[in-house]
Amino acid sequence: MKAQFNWCVAIVVVAIMGVQGGIMANNQDQTPPTATEGRNRLGETTSPYLLQHAANPVHWYPWGNEAFEAARREHKPIFMSIGYSTCYWCHVMERESFEDQEVADYLNEHFISIKVDREERPDVDEIYMTATQIINRGRGGWPMSVFLDPVELKPFFAGTYFPKEDKGTRRGFMSILAFIDDVWKNEPDKVQQQADAIANAVINRLTSTTETTSLSLEVVKKGVAQLLTRHDRVKGGFATAPKFPMSIYCDFLMEAGWETPQVKEAVKLTLDEMLMGGMYDQVGGGFHRYSTDANWLVPHFEKMLYDNGQLVSTYANAYERTGETTYARVIEETLAYVNRELSAPDGGFFSAQDAETNHLEGETYLWRDAEFVEVLNDAGLGDDVKFARAVYGINQGTNFRDPHHPEEPPSNVLHFIDHPSDLASSHDMTESEFNSKIDAIDAALLEVRDTRDQPLTDDKVITAWNGLMITGFADAARVLNNDQWVERAQQAADFILTQMRNEKGMLLRTWRDGKGGGEAFLVDYAAMIRGLLAIHSANQNPEAIASAIELYDQARSLFFVEGRGWYDTQEGQSDLFVRTRALSDGALPAATSLILADLVSLAEITNDPRFKSDAMKSLNSESQLLDRAPTAAVVATQAFNKLYSLHPELFADSTDSIATKTSPVHMTCSPTSLQLAVGESAELTIKLAMTKNWHVNSNAPGNEYAIPLSFKVLNDNVTLETSWPTGKTMISAGESVDVYSDNVSIPIVLHAGEGAKGSIQLMVTWQACDAESCLAQETNQVPCEITVK
């Protein structure tokens, strides 16, 4: 019987793209294939992630020509698994499938299998993650499981983690392998059509260029408003759950709107709640990857160098503005952690630490009440047990249960139950006395914690991540006047600049155990330039500027194309079917955003007009994205704000009108001016007019991936009540969704409560779609002057 599987995603993508695929090439007219030596080749690599899989019975290849040639010679599809060494679900899929002989036998017979470390090859990861998200309607993650044609390396099917066997309606990995093998052999036309359609969609998304759009400071105002709209006013952050630190949002808000009370409150609340929560390692210092909940309490326990580097810079910026001593303490503890756990003996910084120990999420970091008490008693701190249990929330009961191992007893993630200054006050202590007591408690806990089995440390050195950590050390050194930190930053920079270069003098992406990896990408150059500029700001070292300029000149020659802007990769890489230019920020800022920020700083420091000219060229290539969605590339928006403040003459042709020309939705408000007194209510009507064939999702679209229409008042003392009209149901990209189209009027009643005063901002968020695709969500201020008298 032929394998049965839902191929509807392929049909949807082909229909969307309107691409007619050709016939997949075969080997009928070629020399008969020779047998490929059956063995796992990952033991010949240096990547910690690949080495984790070196003993699998799967005949893994690293990404490269040997694997491609074997697949083409034997006319087999490629199965590619992309992940990284500290990825929890990568470990799970390895244990369930890649260590399993049955799975290995099937893979070895029917596929050529490739393992990729996403941290070594971010270009490969970017391309195929884009494909995975296209295939799965925006969903992606790691491990990434992708099937490619062997000729042009185009993806034709993809997902993330798959269990070995079917689970309910969810297909297991063995079923998927059988399905892929069947369609590969029996429906080659459909496979090729799917591969061509997805590849074209990826190329369109990662290489598209747009017309230059004039920018004004309204872009910055819009970015600030968007973040304030998304801000959690109770626990901080800019999302619900899971919550990622996204320090770049706080950086932008501090520079673009610090004098606005709502901005200051949003930044301080976010930074305070993060440092109080379990996402911050209260005992050992440093931040975990993200919070699994909305309260910053239970983290995903891996620790990444790039997070900690960016967060140190953010807290340094905040300390400089506020003088908040708790921020200085977080900086000191985080840098101590990095020096202790992530410092390479040669001077660089290691990449990350794993989330799990002994297959258990967070085992090293968790505490059970009895053990917590025993440690303090054994350390002679018995008198502090009650205090410690109260401060760290132990007396409130357990807060962690391993979702993957329910048989494990519940335990505790340590967290401050209140801000440290308030805790000190409630225990009749000065902050200094409180901190001294906490230091003694933490030291006792850490001493015992260090005797436990420890999570794996990924000991490769990544240039871009080092650049961000160098920046963190240098920023902290400048703000807190610590010469040792800037010396540590310089030591790491010297290592990168001397040891991580090839014979042509080009930067390398990675280094491990005395061996360098492949050539660096734009993000590596941009982040290292950022680090060198931070060193110069800390100690005025002219050599740092000279090195930054040298790296910039190299980067420009490798990655810049006149009239098109920056690319992430060098031209002509034979193992990539597209040269990428990803503009949106993620956990790391987009390379184009970083290099733009570097250029603005270089122009300011050197007064060299070429940097100002290149900054404008870089800005032009991103201008439409910034105009439409300034927080999507918030680092670039921040750089634009700085460039505008330094050189307003460059933007003389811009206007102060709200730029809506790129949106298919036109918004009006009636009345255009509204005044109400405290205790009063008043009504206004918002009208949205959609361009023909476009719609916005309704307030209740009935689809978890559709962004609903919503309104929000940026004032805690003003409430709103919306009378939502009835939407209409339509089928978009094969799925049902409730929408508003043509013209829609939405009455809103505003009520001013006690404490409301002055100008009130009313924000609206929508997602515009046509029958085949959706644009990024937009958040705009409603064009009505609302004032509370």
Image: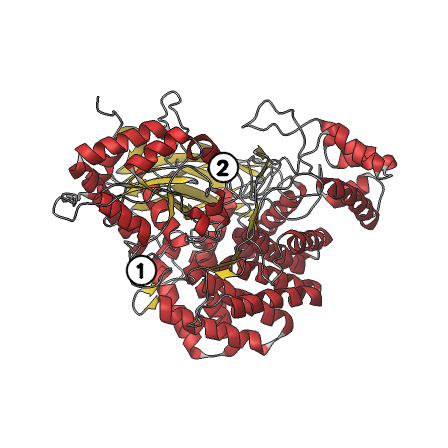
Disc assigned to residue 721: none
Q: In this image, 583 relative to 417: left or right? A: left
SS of the residue under disc 2: helix
Towards the viewer: 21 or 222: 21
Towards the viewer: 14 or 184: 184
Residue at the (23%, 47%) spot, across then down? 73
Q: How far apart are marks 2 and 1 (CA)?
A: 30 Å
Please tell me how crowded label 1 is: few (under 14), some (14-19), or many (20+) other residues with Cα within 10 Å. few
Residue 544 vertical placement versus 287 (above, below): below
Towards the viewer: 579 or 537: 579
| The N terminus sits in image quarter | top left
Tell me how the rendering is colored: secondary structure
- Per the image, the residue denoted by label 1 is 573
Please tell me how crowded label 2 is: few (under 14), some (14-19), or many (20+) other residues with Cα within 10 Å. many
Q: In this image, 314 relative to 174: left or right? A: right
Residue at the (65%, 26%) spot, across then down? 410
Residue 72, percent across and down?
Answer: 24, 47
Residue 90 vertical placement versus 590 (above, below): above
Where residue 16 sits, quadrant-wise, is: top left
Q: In this image, 499 relative to 201: left or right? A: right
Q: In this image, 24 relative to 442: left or right? A: left
SS of the residue under disc 1: loop
Where residue 209 sits, quadrant-wise, is: bottom left
Count of picture labels: 2
Residue 107, percent across and down?
Answer: 33, 35
- Per the image, the residue denoted by label 2 is 91
* Residue 649 shows in this picture: no
The kind of residue on which mark 1 rests is Gln
* Residue 248 shows in this picture: yes
Residue 382, percent across and down?
Answer: 86, 35
